[in-house]
Amino acid sequence: MLPPPTPARTPRTWDVIVVGAGPAGATAARVAAAAGCSTLLLERAAIPRYKTCGGGLIGASLAALPPGLPLKVYDVAGQFTFALDGRQERTLTSRRPTIAMVYRSELDAALTEAAAAAGATVRDSTALTTLEQQDGTVTVKTNHGEVLSARAVVGADGSASRVARHVGVQCAQVDLALEVEVPVDERTADRWRGRLLMEWGPLPGSFAWVFPKGDVCTAGVVAARGNPVALRAYKDAFLTRHGLAAARPLHDTGHLTRCRRSDSPLARGRVLVAGDAAALVDHWSREGISYALRSGDLAGRAAARIAADPAAADTAADHYAREVDDILGTEMRASGTLMNLFTRNPGLVHTAVTRLPPAWSRLDSYIAGHTSVAGIMTTPLARGATALAALLPQGSARTPAREPVPS
Ligand SMILES: Cc1cc2nc3c(=O)[nH]c(=O)nc-3n(C[C@H](O)[C@H](O)[C@H](O)COP(=O)(O)OP(=O)(O)OC[C@H]3O[C@@H](n4cnc5c(N)ncnc54)[C@H](O)[C@@H]3O)c2cc1C
């Protein structure tokens, strides 16, 4: 488990304080500590903590993990069943098993241990309550009444981030996800082993999933925030249809996912935001772990630069914002275009993925980490589908359409 904080390593002013020990924060703390910064990682919950999440690691996430991270993988999906609102089910086989299924409590604890091993001091059950910036120092208050100061702060405190409010993060899309973790019997486990299900749902921009994890399946639904009754009804119908409604779930939770506006700030002064706190999440798939790991890495480096040269704080923060925009912003813009196409006509996306081998091949390459969403959306096929969707009447909208993602 985590080593206890060492009094000798407790400075009057920390080089870097990181708030939140999810993938973004644990990565930022590891990178800042490895760069030689005195680094404090604050986590509100007791570690290991539960996090509502499918726990599916795509290729981009696996590539961004620190080498040799000890992590138990409960299944690896090589088969993908796609369905359109319970119909037109089709199972496709990946060229290689690609999505690793993990438990977030275990992944995040392993990443936090890696941060501690790199020299970061970890304090769990400790929440940031307020933060202020003055005269080149950031002051952080905690729920224990402590007043801590730092040369730089990374806010990685998730989708309800307090640090994001300080920075002024703006969202283009806010969704509600409802998820259960259900114990399954041997026969059901066999039915799902190595296979995951993605079903495009009846609410605009919605989908449902089943992720296999041996004797447990993680299943859930996601749609635009604002219609929880319809979303709950969809979840119940989906779970019943797939024989996952009978057993009492181990967890039955909900969580928001947020996607930033493309002009949303990523820093204010010496305070940077990363991961869900920065609302860095794929508009379409709501995949966020690879975004958290990659932005956490960039934020850890930027915070170390700010701590090393306080006069360069603005330049380092600008550089961070540019790097995130170049790499992750490009991805998010492409996923916003895909989301608009999908919301307008989920049937078209379903037909393309399940009936056109080049479309599935591209998606499969993206899942494996060999191409990006931008790589998918710049193909002639995707451009053609986007143009076609604009001409077709909107499909499968039983409820009013959601606003398109602003480009
Ligand atoms: C239902 C659902 C399913 C998902 N499935 C997947 C999936 O399969 N694959 C995928 O890639 N993405 C998935 N995502 C997205 C993914 O979970 C997030 O993008 C990811 O967790 C972001 O990591 P993070 O480190 O930014 O934030 P988080 O993992 O949310 O970590 C934030 C941490 O900050 C802590 N914290 C909060 N406030 C404070 C405070 N004031 N002080 C101190 N600590 C604080 C929290 O306790 C938490 O530990 C899913 C999301 C949902 C909702």
Image (cartoon, rainbow, N blue to C red):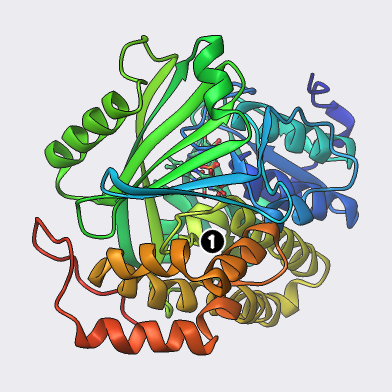
- Examine the image and state in which quarter residue 100 appears: top right
**Nearer to us in this view, 33 or 220:** 220
Indicate whether 41 appears above or below 372. Answer: above
Q: Give whichever of 191, 336 is nearer the camera.
A: 191
Query: Quadrant location of residue 323?
Result: bottom right
Residue 341 visible from this viewpoint: yes
- Relative horizontal placement of residue 390, taking residue 342 as reference (left or right): left
Judge from the rendering whether residue 192 lies leftward or rightward of residue 225; answer left or right: right
- Where residue 57 appears, as percent x and y from the top left, is 64, 46
Element assignment for label 1? strand
Residue closest to the eye, 98 or 348: 348
Q: To which residue does mark 1 refer?
A: 133
Residue at left offset 32%, top offset 70%: 348
For the N terminus, give its image quadrant.
top right
In the image, residue 70 lies at what x, y percent?
Answer: 84, 31
The spot of residue 372 in percent (x, y) is 62, 72
| Above or below: residue 228 compared with residue 245 | below
Q: Is residue 152 visible?
A: no
Q: Is residue 365 left or right of residue 165?
A: right
Image quadrant in which the C terminus is located: bottom left
Density class for disc 1 (Cα within 10 Å; few <14, some 14-19, many ≥20) is some
Q: Residue at x 56, y 55 (%)?
A: 275
Q: Residue 90, image x and y in percent?
A: 44, 49
91 up-or-down from 406: above or below? above
User: Which residue does the image show at 74% across and 78% down from the upper left?
Assistant: 311
Residue 166 occupies quadrant: bottom left
Q: Mark 1 is on which residue type? A: Gln
